[in-house]
């Protein structure tokens, strides 16, 4: 299974969204948030997020390509964040609520609030590199 590190191109956003959806199959955390599975809006949000990252000069969208299988095996979105004011942190949190509108709100909102508060406390108003997404396709049985 020869693997290649490649930059993702916009035409691969759908394949990446499919990969990220499959990576949550049989995942207990996802089952708690999406008892009926993620819906079409969540899938579209994934496609939009990937395409936005591809257009962002402060993001790098990389993939591992399985040349034998002829498909993407994994991808990651690396982001060099922009400094944020307290209001911008709150705006980002509100946008995340919308991104996960199909999830159980009683579970996802406290999770997103804690995640945002921790990032805000540690990262503050500076810039840092981080992965906003990291998904892989497991062929393990």
Image (cartoon, rainbow, N blue to C red):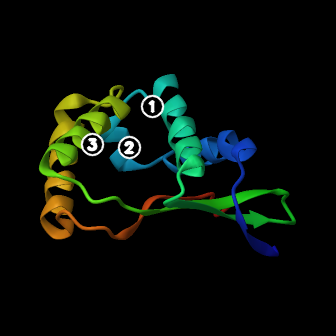
Q: Position of residue 114 (x, y in %)?
A: 15, 52
Closer to the chain start, of discs 3 and 2, is: 2
User: In the orientation shown, which residue stands out farthest toward the bottom?
Assistant: 2
Q: Position of residue 26 (x, y in %)?
A: 48, 47
Closer to the chain start, of discs 3 and 1, is: 1
* Among the 4 quarters of the image, the one containing residue 61: bottom right
Q: Secondary structure at mark 1?
A: loop
Left or right: 112 as drawn, with respect to 63: left
Of the residues tagged 3 and 1, which is closer to the observer? 3
Circle number at residue 92: 3
Tell me the crowding category of disc 3: few under 14, some 14 to 19, or many 20 or more residues within 10 angstroms, Cα based: few
Tell me the crowding category of disc 2: few under 14, some 14 to 19, or many 20 or more residues within 10 angstroms, Cα based: some
Which residue corresponds to the image point at 21% horizontal and 54% vertical from the top-left? 115
Of the residues tagged 3 and 2, which is closer to the observer? 3
Q: Secondary structure at mark 3?
A: helix
Which residue corresponds to the image point at 43% horizontal and 49% vertical from the top-left? 27
Name the residue that disc number 1 marks: 37
Question: Separation of disc 3 and disc 1 at Cα?
Answer: 24 Å
Name the residue that disc number 2 marks: 30
Q: Position of residue 108 (x, y in %)?
A: 24, 39
Which residue corresponds to the image point at 32% horizontal and 31% vertical from the top-left? 103
Q: Are marks 1 and 2 in contact (CB under 8 Å)?
A: no
Q: Are marks 3 and 2 in contact (CB under 8 Å)?
A: no
């Amino acid at each position: 299974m020869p693997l290649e590190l490649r930059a993702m191109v916009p035409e691969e956003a759908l394949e990446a969204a499919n990969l990220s959806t499959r990576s949550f199959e049989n995942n207990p955390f996802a089952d708690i948030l999406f008892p009926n599975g993620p819906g079409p809006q969540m899938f579209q949000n994934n496609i939009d997020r990937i395409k936005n990252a591809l257009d962002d000069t402060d993001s790098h969208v990389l993939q591992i390509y399985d040349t034998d299988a002829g498909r993407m095996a994994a991808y990651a979105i690396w982001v060099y964040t922009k400094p944020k004011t307290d209001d911008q942190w709150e705006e980002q949190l509100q946008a995340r609520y919308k991104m996960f509108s199909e999830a159980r709100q009683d579970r996802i909102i406290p999770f997103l609030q804690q995640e945002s508060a921790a990032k805000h406390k540690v990262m503050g108003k500076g810039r840092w590199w981080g992965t906003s997404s990291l998904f892989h396709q497991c062929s393990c049985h």
